[in-house]
Amino acid sequence: MEIKLDDLSGKEITALIQFHLNNMAEISPPESCHALSVDSLKSDNISVWSAWKNGELLGCGALMELDTLHAEIKSMRTVTAHLGKGVAAHLLQHLVKVAEQRGYQRLSLETGTVTEFLHARKLYEKFGFVECGPFADYVLDPLSYFMTKTLAT
């Protein structure tokens, strides 16, 4: 598996992000949906990586800098055909490593509380993320589950 910084210009990655947006909109009401569009992911404070094998897109994940010491994981998504194959774990490991290299002391994320997000929460827990309160511009929401990890810098 090759994980590379993505400029979001390819049709495969844009289709995966649009699929992610559509799926999140099906699961969560608008006020509880925090997924970002391709245009939003092109922000200067966001870096996106995609995972590939033999020319096929497997998944993606992003880091959004909140400040010089704190980043947020965004847009973690595995292509449906590759669920359960370790793609998300490899991407998450890569994001944590990059966050440490950039000198962030804390890495946080928001995911959902409903059943569809259970596997994601378990993955984040496996990598040392723990439940926390809202961070950045988030507010308490019964459909949001906030997690954070202190990084070794």
Image (cartoon, rainbow, N blue to C red):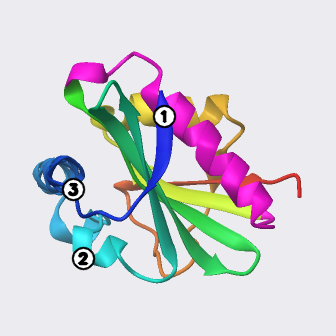
Count of labels in the image: 3
Mark pair 3, 1: CA separation = 16 Å
Residue drawn at 49 percent across, 66 percent down: 47
Residue 112 placement, left or right of 62: left
The x, y position of residue 36, in whole percent, is 29, 68
Q: Name the kind of residue labelled 2 in the image.
A: Asp
Disc with the residue nearer the chain's start (2 vs 1): 1
Q: Quadrant of the C terminus?
A: bottom right
Q: Name the kind of residue labelled 3 in the image.
A: Gly
| Relative vertical location of residue 54 with respect to residue 61 in this rendering, above or below | above
Mark pair 3, 2: CA separation = 13 Å
Q: Which mark is residue 123?
A: none
Mark 2 or mark 1, which is nearer to you? Answer: 1
Foreground residue among 11 and 63: 11
Which residues lie in the magenta part? 81-105
Q: Is residue 109 magenta?
A: no
The x, y position of residue 151, in whole percent, is 81, 54
Image quarter of residue 116: top left
Foreground residue among 88 and 129: 88
